[in-house]
Amino acid sequence: MDIGKRFCVLTGDRKFSSSLSGISAYAEKEGYDFLFSTCEMMVKDEYLRKFAPETFDYIVIDEVHRAGSKTYEKIIDYFRPEFLLGMTATPERTEDENKIYELFDHNVIYEIRLQDAMEQELLCPFHYYGITDLKGIDDRSYQLSDFHRLFTKERLDYIIEKSQFYGYSGDRLRGLIFVSRKEEGKELALLLEERGYHAAFLSGENDQKEREESIALLEEKDKEKPYLDFLITVDIFNEGVDIPEVNQILMLRPTISPIVFIQQPGRGLRRWEMKDFVGIIDFIGNYDNNYMIPQAFAPSGDKEEARMVVSSCYLPGISTIEFDEIARDKIFRSLSKARMNTFETFRSEYRHLKNKLGRIPSLVDFLDYSEFDPLRILQDKRWKSYPAFLSKMKEEGYEELSLDALDYLAVLGQILGKGLRKDEALFLSKRIQKEIFLPFVLPVSDEGQWTDKRKTTILNEFRNDYFQKKDPKQAIVSDWERLSIGFSPFLSQEWFKKAVVDLIEFSLKRNERHYGKGYRDTGFTLFERYTRDDVSVLFDLEKSHGATFNGYQHPKGTNLFPIFVNYVKAEDISEATKYEDHFVDPTLFSWTSRHGEKKTSANMRTLIHHHENGTKVYLFVQKSTKEKEERGLHYFLGEMDVLKSYEVREKGYDYVRF
């Protein structure tokens, strides 16, 4: 604390104020440099009117997501500071989110998310354990008459056992328990007391004084004085409560949303000198919303990213995440059923970003200011382009585009949306330089270094005859130098021009983010996902071979041999195609050819002698075809060497196994 500055608090309780070291209670005739108070106190006229509107040079409002309430509004409208700063950990929670951003002219000075905070070690490290709850704990069928099942002796033993097993950091247990209902919290507090623990339950029915007294008992450092081992609550500690001493959190309720999921463990993430970590124990029952658990750690909304969190248990920094086998299976099942690409999801993400920026966001804005990937909009068959989605949103100020214009943008979205490589975006940007002024500096093009195959691929893409079932009438270019006579006139329309430029910038930036680390001399990035059409483009094939790869192919005139594997076979496929492909270990893969192949067939000879003939063999693995969102997406796992091969006959068919 700066000795040259004077601090005071305005609480209405002089005894409490005087107990704070180095801080005085507010006295009207004395001068202070800094005043601390609560909104509940400052809003009262008897205190508010003690100050002239221009009294404070600098006002900081915590929990500013509540600024839409009458209490906060009255204070903000009254004072005229030179600088007003609002802080909140949950801007998404407010009912009138746009109003909060408008209050600060949409000026977001700094924003940090959980992952970044963990990497920068701003939070106390945590160890999250997702464990299976006892059989029968299922919120979908819960009735008050079933209440006895929640806290049987068996389940109480189980809760206590897991609390003791996973432990805590510090001199004694200071636990926070979240439950679903008041009757649960009251009953659990009584049962824990019977087991020798000191426990109390708080809900919205408890006033502020009761809450503060219970928190003080949980924080108590002197074991000779009354204290609490567990504080049990329903919802009221989701935000705005600071208890750094909490060293264990038990979550005995289903996940309502990723935001709430983060908020509740967040009560224990404040650093405290007497704890090295906080233990978070999540009892996972048969809840439909289980998929929201990994979503909290993988907020992009991508199902596979969420699965990777559960499978790999990786988190930034030194925090850890761990699931037992049954809990992991429950989450995977929940993820499989979850609908992640609903219009409501897209609209919510869009509105949140629009509120933050105070304008209609661009595709690039999503990359810069959001964790949502707008590629999900571009790939959705309901819209196929961002302007078509804006049309659905009925945005004021947005200029509706014709169906023909939207069709052109849908074609461009397929070519540029993923940002597989920069070449296509650079090609288009150079062509339209002659038509319109681009509001960004054009990167240096590599056209002079492109091979003839690369040029042919790019030209065919923009002629819109590269992929199957595409209409050449929607061609973007007529030849290597000129835009098509159908596409070019639309560039005079402001919103069409904006959409084209946005797609180019988005493609270049997304390429840097997702595909910046090229694998050897290929255009691929290890462990990224690709469709067979994507593979055709990056192999610089004249036409897409997406529908003709049939598991593997040696495209004519190339030294390439891609192998596509569906790892988890569908149950309804024929016996002949239930290939026994599997990883023997992380670097060794067992693969089987199509039935009817012999070692003497052309494809097999090329594969077996790939070293001698200079053929590159690449492996692409799709997890399964079970889920629509993941169908056709193959992980690129790199180049393979054939170690050995032999012919087999199984199920009445001939195969070659490698």
Image (tube, rainbow, N blue to C red):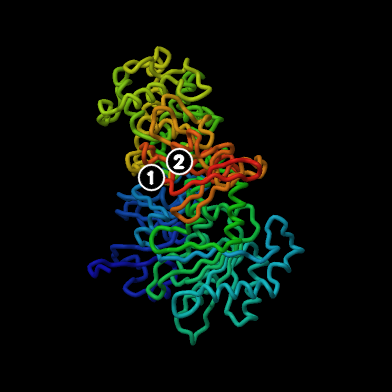
Q: Position of residue 654 (x, y in %)?
A: 59, 41
Residue, disc 2: 373
Q: Position of residue 191 (x, y in %)?
A: 66, 76
Indicate whether 423 appears above or below 228. Answer: above
Instruction: Tell me which amino acid carries mark 2.
Output: Asp
Residue, disc 1: 104
Q: Is residue 1 visible?
A: yes
Within 10 Å of disc 2 (Cα), the crowding (few <14, some 14-19, many 20+) is: some
Q: Position of residue 530 (x, y in %)?
A: 46, 38
Dot 2 falls on a residue whose secondary structure is loop
Indicate whether 195 appears above or below 324. Answer: below
Residue at the right extreme? 145
Q: In the depicted view, which residue is nearer to us: 617 or 15? A: 617
Q: In the depicted view, which residue is nearer to us: 371 or 394? A: 371
- Image point (29%, 28%), residue name: 450
Q: Name the image quarter holding residue 114.
A: bottom left
Q: Give the position of the N terminus as an image quadrant.
A: bottom left
Q: In the depicted view, which residue is nearer to us: 140 or 306? A: 306
Residues at marks 2 and 1, CA–CA distance in whole angstroms: 26 Å
Numbered tag placed on residue 294 in the rendering: none
Instruction: Tell me which amino acid carries mark 1.
Output: Phe
Within 10 Å of disc 1 (Cα), the crowding (few <14, some 14-19, many 20+) is: few
